[in-house]
Image (cartoon, rainbow, N blue to C red):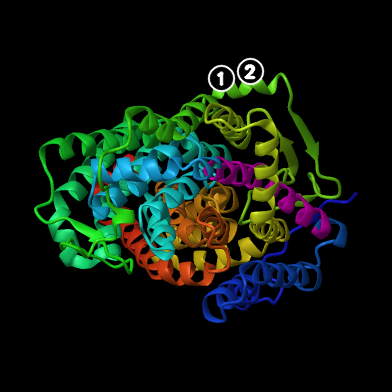
Amino acid sequence: MEIWSQNYDPFGNIFVSALVAAVPAILLIGLIALLEVKIHFAALIALAASLVLALVIYHMPASAVTASTVYGAAYGLFPIGWLVLNIIFLYQLTVKRGLFDILRDSLARVAPDPRIQLILIAFAFGAFLEGMSGFGAPVAITAAILIQLGFKPLQAAGLTLVANTAPVAFGSLGIPITTLQQVTDLNLLALSATVGAQLVIFSLSIPFVILIMLCGWRGLFGVWPAALVAGLSYTVPQFLVSTYHGPWLAAPIAGLSALGSLVVLLRFWKPKVLWAFNGEGELGPERGGSVNPRLTPAGAPASGRSVFLAWMPWGLLTLVLLVWGVPLFQTAIDRIFSAEFPMPYLHQLVRRMPPIEVAQAAPINAIFKFHFLSSTGTGTFLAAVATGFLIGFSWREMIRLYLETIWRIRLSLLTIATMLALGNVTRYCGTDGTMGLALAHTGSFYPFFGPLLGWVGAAITGSDTSSNVLFGSLQKITAQQVGVSAVLMCAANTCGGVMGKMISSQSIVVASTAMNWYGHESRILRYVFLPSVILAILVGLLVYLEAYFIPFTYMVAK
């Protein structure tokens, strides 16, 4: 078949073309946030709009439009949907045996104040999980734990999404940055160091941000030492590892450092006034008789064996994810079984054009990689099955519960598949390039708008890695045209994407599904939208200063 070349300005005016290209994204956000349409319906409507744009406005061949839709939906189901399904299955196993109640009680005894629980679980433990696995696992696991500790569903989902921003750039053993290096052919360590430097302020501030969102400045005042220790013990290792070693272990090491530092701090320091959830789920200073006994430790603690069993599933999952994330293990196990399928009517049949890509660039690959054994979801499934046997489930009971879990999250899987289909149609028809070029037409202000491009990419695709794939080359080319550091701007794409991931429909669906709160995605989106925008603007301001006024950072970026 003949190769189809993308056209980024079908109306002859890049700003008009960009406005039209943004229609699916505007529809999606508007339907969810303003009209409170169910997210799977909103995703299907936005996908339909993107298909019309691709066919009618961008004149993409119908065969390629269909293929890109199927390709994206397949990727949504595997590996992402496969991972979400098995995390929820593991969670359901622990709930059925009452182990989650014991885990909640043990956490409440170690860190009885919900404010510290939020930092410990959503920020520190979530960062470790993001560094090891990504793909929604941290959001699903930590949101599920918080909901059992008494957090309202909206708080658990929204605060987990915001807390998960810090490690996203180095998630899944550094995949966003290693992918960016492959797309741009820039120095990997320079990219890693620049991202680490740009994230210092934000990583340090995230514990304070989520506390203010939870309980305001008054609540923050009583536990600021915990927020400071968590922020410092996370940020310093992330900066050092990303600068002197590379992107692979920055998030896991930083997450473990924050976890350990908080546990040590709690042995020597406690807040003077404990806060707790009352019977109505409101958080405030603890008063006699006002605290819901279901949400706070009462009576004798559980036996050591019970506590061990309660933590065992999550410890086993962490161990499995640690092994599954090692590249040597993945390569070895893929030799046993893996398959790759070039997508018919799409693989190497679409070409990106200048200035998005260099002249005569190779056509875009479209290969569905079915690496089943090395998939994080498969490791999670094995951990769940092992947990089931260890806590007394039979094969028949587990099969029944697994089928119930599939039914429980069926609409979530549909939404994830639809969102990934939307993202792939956007990428292959070139509407992403249209929006990117409009932002690139900002001249000397480009360093401010460059991170916003990464923000848009992650918000649409649900992945910082995908955002780097979409816009990494454009950032490099535009930076060279404007006369600023290409490394700086490509790193800025990653950091902007970090702030956009929290409002991606994929991430929101994972959070709502983990808490069995599907159907309330509009509330979650409204809860996190403003923090996402503010943080993205702050990244833009920082990068603008780095480009023109901060010599040290600029030297690192060069």
Instruction: Name the residue that disc number 2 marks.
Output: 332
Furthest residue to the front?
A: 299
Residue 193 part of the magenta-drawn span: no
Give the quarter of the figure containing the C terminus: top left
Q: Hey, what amino acid is under mark 1?
A: Leu
* Amino acid type of the residue tagged 2 in the rendering: Ala
User: Distance between the Cα atoms at labels 1 and 2?
Assistant: 6 Å
Residue 116 visible (yes or no): yes
Secondary element type, mark 2: helix
> Residue 62, how many percent across, how many down?
86, 62
Q: Which residue in the structure is indicated by mark 1?
A: 328
Q: Are marks 1 and 2 in contact (CB under 8 Å)?
A: yes
Compared to residue 256, the image places residue 468 above or below, namely below
Quadrant in the rendering for residue 541: bottom left
Secondary structure character of the magenta stretch overall: helix
Task: Give above or below for 417 relative to 91.
Answer: below
Residue at 48% across / 56% down in the picture?
501
341 vs 204, left or right, is right
In the image shown, does 246 or 8 lie closer to the viewer?
246
Indicate the secondary structure of the residue bearing disc 1. helix
As displayed, is residue 479 above or below residue 217? above
Magenta residues span 65-92
Residue 72 on the magenta segment: yes
Label 1 CA crowd tier, 10 Å (few <14, some 14–19, many 20+):
few
Left or right, 175 with reference to 282: right
Q: Would residue 186 be visible to someone looking at this image? A: no
Q: Position of residue 289 (x, y in %)?
A: 19, 63
Q: Which of the pair 495/218 is nearer the observer?
A: 218
The residue nearer to you, when weighing 128 against 21, is: 128
Can you give x and y, in whole percent of width and height, for residue 15 in the image?
58, 76
Q: Hey, which residue is sitting farthest bottom in the picture?
A: 35
